[in-house]
Image (cartoon, rainbow, N blue to C red):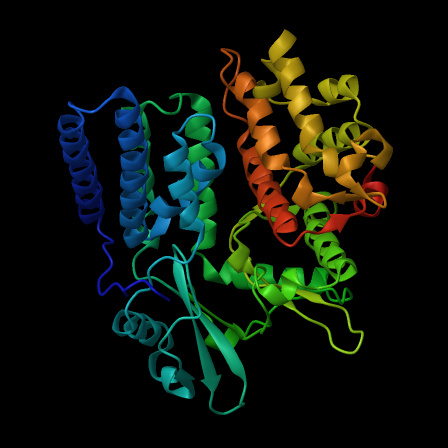
Amino acid sequence: MTDKPLNTLKTSPLDRQLSLAKTSLTIGKNWAKTGLSGLFLSKEQRETQKDAFMQEQANYLVAELGKLKGSVVKVGQMLALYGEHMLPPAVVSALHTLDADTAPIAWSVIYEALKHELGERIDDFEIEQTPIGTASLAQVHKAYHKFSGRTVALKIQYPNVAGAIDADLAVFKKLLKVTGILPQTRALDDWFDEIRELLYREVDYRMEADTTKRFATYLANDDRYVVPTIYDNYSTDRLICMSFESGLSLNDEQILNLPQDRKNALGQSAIDIVMRELFEWGEMQTDPNFGNYLVRLGTQGETDKLVLLDFGAIKQFDKKLLTIANNLLVAGFYQDKTMMKNAMTGYDFFDNLNGKPKDDMATVFLMACEPFAKPHLIDEKLLDDGRYIWANSDLYNRVMVSAKDGMTSKEFTLPPKEMMFISRKFIGAYALLSAIDARTDSLGLIGQYV
């Protein structure tokens, strides 16, 4: 942890609105100063100065959002994923850093929160004061249970962030309205309603504990995955006590230096669980943050395992959505544009598209399904013995560039909120598999679903 711990957390609606207002005012003043300083520069010099300043101010904005924690950070993360076609690159780049560990909350504040949840039972633990993980809504501390000898992880929610959700979303929506970076439509209202619902589920730790136990049941007979054990007697509405699960981060050099077949197996495991979430269980963990995963390397020929750490951002899908998603995937498997356009139905987002915009969007979906297509239907340069080479594909950037024209069409509206959460998970999976240079087998992934 390199960030200085925060000794206070602004949780009242007024404090958070004032903080954002102060941030906006500071940025406005800085823009005015840079405008004056650029009066005597050449056009090229002014453009260079503008780009550097934009990056600096975007980094400042993100740093201030990180201090607020809570819902405002979550919305910023969502904008990072969907903002490429509507926000300056510097802003998108800075927003992506919100996925990393944000500044921790000081131990004195965390201790009081733990004591509030555990009461006298806090003395049952020896707790490390330095967190092993920080996020927008919670902080995780490693602890030793004195009586059982178990090492546990205590996930403690920041004080009062749950009560700030509605105010946070209202403030962020006002910011979007003022900047005009997103169309103020019913689709946007639905999107914010969906985020609100998801956030309220995320701050319900009883629900997260139950979901963790449910996924542990799903994966009980699959030795590729590890799911933490929940200790109900020390868990509350705002605290989860679970088994401490060791492992390496996904960007650890040991992972990157594994033999190709082991990296392939890990990648296959990572994307396979996404398929099972969508097509078998009908519920998906929609937060693709790399920090939600660890890798436990096998010894003496044992299977390398993915450790799944977070089950808060769970979204359950109805049969309508699952049927549409399956039809889109089948069309992608066969790389059939007519089949893809026929599958694009059931939501206004699809049904309002006609002519070239619909044709363009079908092309985008076919490209996004490239890793799941029959191998002989895609460029052989992207294949290694029939397996898709994620690191060579530049898939995410190609999809976003291809989507740009369709998104600027007058016929384009915000995608269905369910689709946005699914795409968020797939974007994270694409990044993960590219990062570890995995090569996956499409038939092994989706053969049973098509």
Residue 11 appears in view: yes
Seen in the image, is 198 located left or right of residue 377? left
Residue drawn where x is 40% and y is 49% of the image:
98
For image coordinates 51% across by 78% down, the residue present is 152
- Judge from the rendering whether residue 180 lies leftward or rightward of residue 196; answer left or right: left
Instruction: Classify the position of the C terminus by image quarter.
Output: top right
- The N terminus sits in image quarter: bottom left
Q: Above or below — where is 134 with respect to 65?
A: below
Q: Residue at x 36, y 25 (%)?
A: 181
Q: In the image, 350: left or right of 15? A: right
Q: Residue furthest bottom?
A: 147
- Picture layout, residue 168 above or below residue 155: above
Residue 334 drawn at (x, y percent): 82, 28
The one of 347 and 57 positioned closer to us in this rendering: 57
The total number of labels drawn is 0
Height in image: 164 above or below 173?
below
Q: Quadrant of residue 338?
A: top right
* 330 vs 32, nearest the viewer: 32
User: Residue 131 location in percent, x, y?
Assistant: 40, 71
Position of residue 155 measured from the top left corner of the image (x, y, whole percent) = 44, 68
